[in-house]
Amino acid sequence: MTPTLESQRAHFAISPGIAYLDAAYLSPIPIAAAEAGAKAAWTKAAPWQMTIGAFYDEVEEARVLAAAMIGAEADEIALTAATSYGMAIAAANVPVPAGSAIVLMENEHTSNRYVWYELAERNGAHVVIAPKPDDDDWTAALVAAIRNSPWPVAVVAGSLVHWFEGMLLDLEAVAQASREAGACLVVDGTQWVGALPFDVRRVRPDFLAFATYKFLLGPYRQAFLYADRRWHETGVTLEHHSWNRLGGEKPDFYLVNKPGFMAGARRFDMGQRSDFATLPSTIVALAMLRGWGLDAVAKRLAYLNRLIWDEAESRALIEARPARPIPHIAILELGDRMAADAGPRLKAAGVHVTLRGSKMRVSPHVYNEEADIAQLFDNLAL
């Protein structure tokens, strides 16, 4: 079925002949977002023209837009610098007693892996790994690891997708198993927020971190953190500065020895959150996504990915489609059908995907067209 949302390539500075199919690595930002960032960068060139609103207004606008991407409220969103920053906040808050366990999927992304090993080592806890399942059912594997842990489970670090294997999880089922175990749930959303419809109310994680530089079409060094309301009153922040404190916008902010935090997840906001170039670019990108409609975006990405699987199947490049593929990313196991020089050949032909061993990850976005997919397979040179 043809999606209602057509290609939005005209909004991006993608040269003719370029088939950029690597949003899961790094997406291009829209032209309007780049222009907004360039214009805003000049703000600091004339700081005498700035007002205190420059430190607050766009922060709150970005917070509202980010919340809309996951069905949250603005008060539940903090501005951070990266997924790893959000995970560090989560690790600073979730209780992990000695002798308890933190559950991860095998080969989890490093931004959602290293921090938990560090925390377990520091607290005398254990890391339990859900191994790669033979049937690709990562939901069952992760739930089994939670229920069969030899130690009480304190934290489950999960996601809606497995970033490397390209499989979709039932995050609601994982959340239910986490609650039954009395564990906190911390989620990495960087590889799917903006590409898949998501209602945070249905999952209710403790924390959900997501960066903007992939499927949210935003700049690098901009991310957000959803924090459940249970953490809003007593949550531990990583940084202490004026901008997440009450009265920080007032000229005499320095007179109060230790003011309280601003409402909600704002206590977790990073220092220098008011990046005068990054924030305007982020706002434009998120506003464009909201204008297109997340459901419409998701349907277009699913449509393009079906074409990718169809091409791979028709050319006998794969043995079978996975049972639980991610709707917006196609990770094809090509085995010995991957030519040794496939990477250089594709780049020379203007095709950009991610190749890891015998896997090819293809991740289109709204700027892609059917011709990009044909260009990929016509130049794969297997």
Image: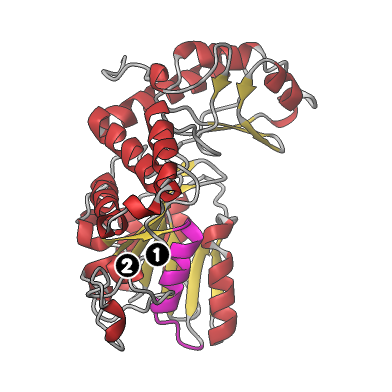
Q: Residue at x 44, y 59 (%)?
A: 158
Q: Position of residue 293 (x, y in %)?
A: 24, 31
In this view, the residue in front, 230 or 245, is 245
Can you tell which quarter of the image residue 201 is in? bottom left
Going by the numbered disc 2, the residue's amino acid type is Asp
- 262 over 315 or under it: above or below: below
Residue 338 is covered by the magenta coloring: no
To which residue does mark 2 refer?
206
Relative side of 78 to 155, left or right: left
Q: Nearer the viewer, residue 241 or 81?
A: 241
Residue with the most extreme right position:
340
What quarter of the picture does the N terminus occupy? Answer: top left
Q: Is residue 243 above or below residue 25?
A: below
Crowdedness near tag 1: few (<14), some (14–19) or many (≥20) residues, C-alpha within 10 Å: many
Residue at (26, 18) in percent of width and height: 4
Say whether residue 120 is visible: yes
Which circle's residue, 1 or 2, is located before the other in the chain? Answer: 1
Up the image or down, 39 lies above or below 313; here it is below
Q: Which residue is pictured at 68% across the width and 20% down the height?
A: 346
Q: Place residue 187 in its image quadrant.
A: bottom left
Residue 51 drawn at (x, y percent): 28, 56
State the extent of the magenta-drawn residues as a range. 81-98
Task: Name which residue type carries label 1.
Answer: Val
Q: Position of residue 81 (x, y in %)?
A: 46, 58
Q: Of 276 and 234, which appears nearest the observer?
A: 276
Residue 131 seen from this side: no
User: What residue appears at the point 42 percent right and 39 percent down from the top-left corner?
Assistant: 37
Residue to which mark 1 is pinned: 186
Marks 2 and 1: in contact by CB < 8 Å? Answer: yes
Residue 219: give x, y in percent of width and height: 46, 42
Q: The residue tagged with tag 1: helix, strand or loop?
A: strand
Q: Is residue 188 above or below residue 232?
A: above
